[in-house]
Image (cartoon, rainbow, N blue to C red):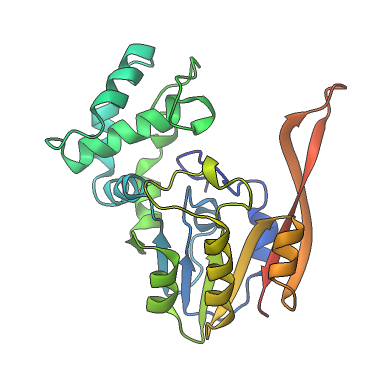
Amino acid sequence: MDSFITWIGGKKLLRKKITEIFPENIDRYVEVFGGAAWVLFYKEKYAKQEIYNDINGELVNLFKCVKYHPNAIVEELQLILNARQIFNDFQQNKNRTDLTDIQRAAMFYYIIRTSYGAKLEQYSANYRSPYLLLQNVEEIAKRLSRVVIENKNFTDILAQYDKEDTLFYCDPPYYKAEKMYHMGNYVFDKEQHILLRDSLRNIKGHFVLSYNDDEFVRNLYEGFDIQEVERSSNLSFSNGKRGIYKELIITNF
C-alpha cells in the first residue's frame, strides 16, 4: 500500500531496501520521524505493536482523523475544487481556533495535495483532484487501526518505547537540509543530530536509520554498520537523464 500523502523526505523509492534490513522477531515497531509513513504502509504488519510518531501536530491530527473518521475527511473534500483561491483561503484560515479536528485535517490535506512539491507554501496549479489519494481511505484507516499515533520529540519516543525486541526506524531531517522539513517551532540543528546519535547509542532495542551521505553523518556514526544505497534524484541533467542521489542506511546490528 502507498501513503496517502507526499511529504518532504518520503521514502517511497527506498522502502524496499530499508525493510529488507529489518530484523525478524520484533514485538514492537516504531517510526520515530513518521512523515508520510511510506515504510509503515509498505507492509500490512511489522510487529504486534506499531507506533507512528511525528513532531508536526497538524500531520499527526491528519493521521488520527484518517484513522478514526476516514469518511468524514472525504466528505469534507469531495466537492471542493482544485483552485488557487481555495488554496489561499485555506492557508489564511488553517489556524482558526473554531475549526474541528476533521476540518483542520481536511484543510491540511488539501494544502499538501495542491501545494508545489508538497511544501505547503505555493499553489502548484496542477490538475489533480485534491482527494485523489483518499479513494481507498477505508483501507488506509484499516492499516492505521492497529497503529498508535504519537506527537512527541524523538528523545521522548525513544525513551518511552525502548526494549530489547523494539525496532526503531528513524528518518530524521537530512543534514544541511533541515529547513526543508515541516516541524513547526521545533528546531532541528547540528546539536539535534548529535543528540539523536547519543540517544540511539544507548537504546536496548534495534534501530535502522536513513540519512543523506555526508562526511559529518559518516563520522557521527563511526562504529555502526553503514550501508550505501542509491536512488533516483528528482533533478535532471542537461541530457535529460535523472541524477543519482546517494544515501546511507545505518544500523546497530
Q: Is residue 98 left or right of residue 195?
A: left
**Is 16 located above or below residue 103 in the figure?**
below
> Would you say 83 lies left or right of 204 here?
left
Examine the rendered structure and indicate whether residue 239 appears above or below residue 234: above
In the image, residue 75 lies at what x, y percent? 24, 30
Q: Which residue is pictured at 27% across the width and 47% down the height? A: 65
- As drawn, the residue found furthest toward the right would be 239
Residue drawn at x 41%, y 78% as measured from the top left? 159
Q: Position of residue 186 (x, y in %)?
A: 40, 52
Out of 204 and 165, give the one closest to the viewer.
204
Q: Position of residue 179 (x, y in %)?
A: 53, 43
Residue at image point 50% right, 17% down: 126
Relative horizontal placement of residue 20, taking residue 180 as reference (left or right): right
The spot of residue 216 in percent (x, y) is 72, 61
Which quadrant of the structure image shows residue 223?
bottom right
Q: Is residue 151 visible?
A: yes
**At 36% across and 54% down in the image, what residue appears?**
142
